[in-house]
Image: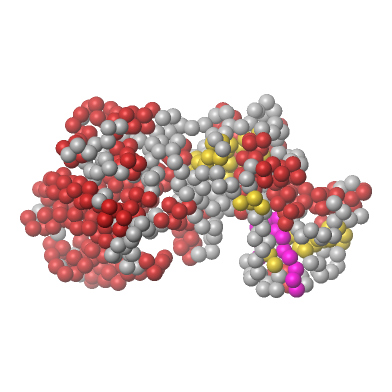
Amino acid sequence: MASQPGLLTEWPWRKLGSFKYLVLAPWVVQSAYSFIINQGEERDLFYYFIFPFIIWRMLHSQIWISYARYRTAKGNNRIVDKSIEFQQVDRESNWDDHIILNGLLFYLYNMVTRGAIKFPLWRGDGVILTILLHAGPVEFLYYWFHRALHHHFLYSRYHSHHHSSIVTEPITSVIHPFAEIFMYYILFSIPFFGTIFTGTNSIVAFLGYSTYSDMMNYMGHCNFEFIPRRLFELFPLLKYFMYTPSFHSLHHTQFRTNYSLFMPIYDYIYGTVDKSSDSLYETSLKRQEESPDVVHLTHFTTPDSIYHSRLGFASWAASPYSSSKWYHKLLTLWSPSMLSWNQPIVVEKHLLNQLNLQTWAMPRYIFHYGLSSRQNEAVNALIEGAILKAEKENVKVISFGLLNQGQELNKNGALYTQKHPNMKLKVVDGSGLAVAAVLHSIPKGTRQVFLHGNLSNKMTYAIVKALLQDGVQVATPCKDQFEILRLRFAPDLQNNVILSTSYAHEVWLVGEGLERDEQKRAPKGAIFIPFAQFPIAQKRKDCSYYNTPAMIIPDTLENMHSCEKSDERMARIAGIVHALEGWTEHECGDTSMEVEKVWIAALKHGFKPFYNINRA
């Protein structure tokens, strides 16, 4: 929002939220219907192509969004080092509004004039005229309009909203108040109406010009430089007719220079070129890819989780993960069966106390229990390749949560450290910190807990062991679990493992395997503390439910603008703490960090416990 919002700041459909696309629905239906029932020359090609063009603009935008976030996370050729936070993500969540507006304007024009029926698919003279009208009137008028927007009156009421983003992303280019972007559309309509009035109009000219505008807009707001120096060496005059990301980045950091739209010629004519434009361009091109200190290794768990990642849809990445919404399910239908490359990709970059952190995503979402031996080998090869890549890049710690899928898959991660015993890299699964978070969420004075859930990972056994050592009785309704626990622990602890025929316990430790009917048997006021994702969506109103193990990040952690899956966050934090403390041991296999040791270290570095008790 601008510092002093002016008239027509809000977008007309803002209150519609996710249903804002419905404003286009009548036009889309009508255009498709008229195209079907009409034949030959009666068909209105322009009217029909508006909706496919809207879809193309959305896809084109997403390509730039994903590519820019990937490149920015890698760090090579980065321009500005400052971080992007949740506030910017929220502010830029309506980046698609301008596409809806563009579609509406095209539909309204077609309805009022009906002249679009005569639009041919292609006319060469119309394309040339479009180029000339853009290079002349559009660029010239935009330059002076843009300078006017930097006058205090207009800047405080409109343009300051756009400049709230110092570190730009492609979608930053279209984040403006409604009135401002409407004025931009008037400017960009000059070539549109110029070709109409001269009778040289064509569908390719209109749609091509819009695609060009989108491409240049998004390119100029990338936070990395990628326009090759060789291009300007071959065509020296090109520097006056095509800007670069570093050129426009200076406008966002210096404010009073580099006002041009896409062609810097008017900045050169009127003396508003930033003096550091050339040096920043050269410096950005030379910047190398950063080597992280800590890597968190994750993977896509379901087809729609691809879109929820930071490289996917920003609004999804900034909110808790869910696969229950209808549009998630719709996208899943055309998700790739999953990306076939064999290297992890960088999806996020963070900074904490000069510690460089990256998140690498594995190119599969097939990780689950019950894989065949061949699938196990393939998965292990992928993980091992990522670990060796991290070792080669001198990463200090690599952490992973969901990839550690138990003894069956990789011996709880020990497979890799045993195979490569001389690695300097430390492998951390975060089990010690996760156990500490669960133990510290149990109310003080509790002398007995009711354990219900699969004993499929070492975290469960570590929690039980810590409770038994503290003299807390662990009751379970499952005879098989009772026998397993008694055999696993020393004789002095076995007496505190109880086979319970009653469900009347006040504190429940729950994981996968809890059934809804069993939850109903808990007494009124019972407390459910999950050591994994709580398996039942429907919760009782007369009981309390803790969140899965979690901690609040310190304010000094930079560039945090996405939400993690709950199973992952403790492993990530544990990896960071491991590196900050300089610990030299692995935390994988049957080994876990000492619970209190890792808990105290996490608190020391600014992580805080998060106990969110809620009632349905």
Outermost left residue? 198
Query: In the image, what residue occupies the spot 22% across and 51% down?
Result: 148
Check residue 395 for magenta coloring. no
Picture coordinates of residue 151 (x, y %)?
A: 25, 51
Please indicate whether residue 165 sits to the left or right of residue 516 in the image.
left
Instruction: Name which quarter of the figure residue 183 lies in.
Output: bottom left
Please indicate, yes or no, whether residue 371 appears anywhere in the rendered image: no
For the residue pair 516 and 408, the one nearer the viewer reads as 516
Is 402 situated above or below 516?
above
Picture coordinates of residue 437 (x, y %)?
A: 70, 51
Please indicate, yes or no, whether residue 74 appears anywhere in the rendered image: yes
Please indicate whether residue 616 sits to the left or right of residue 47 in the image.
right
Query: In the image, what residue occupies the spot 49% across and 62% down?
Result: 329
Dominant secondary structure of the magenta stretch?
A: loop
Colouring used for the render: secondary structure
Quadrant in the picture for the N terminus: bottom left
Picture coordinates of residue 269 (x, y %)?
A: 16, 37
Outermost front residue? 152
Query: In the image, what residue occupies the spot 56% across and 32% down?
Result: 389
Instruction: Name which quarter of the figure residue 220 lies in.
Output: top left
For the residue pair 213 and 6, the one nearer the viewer reads as 6
Query: In the image, what residue occupies the spot 76% across and 58% down?
Result: 442
Looking at the rendering, the stretch of residues picked out in magenta corresponds to: 524-536
Instruction: Name which quarter of the figure residue 187 lies in.
Output: bottom left
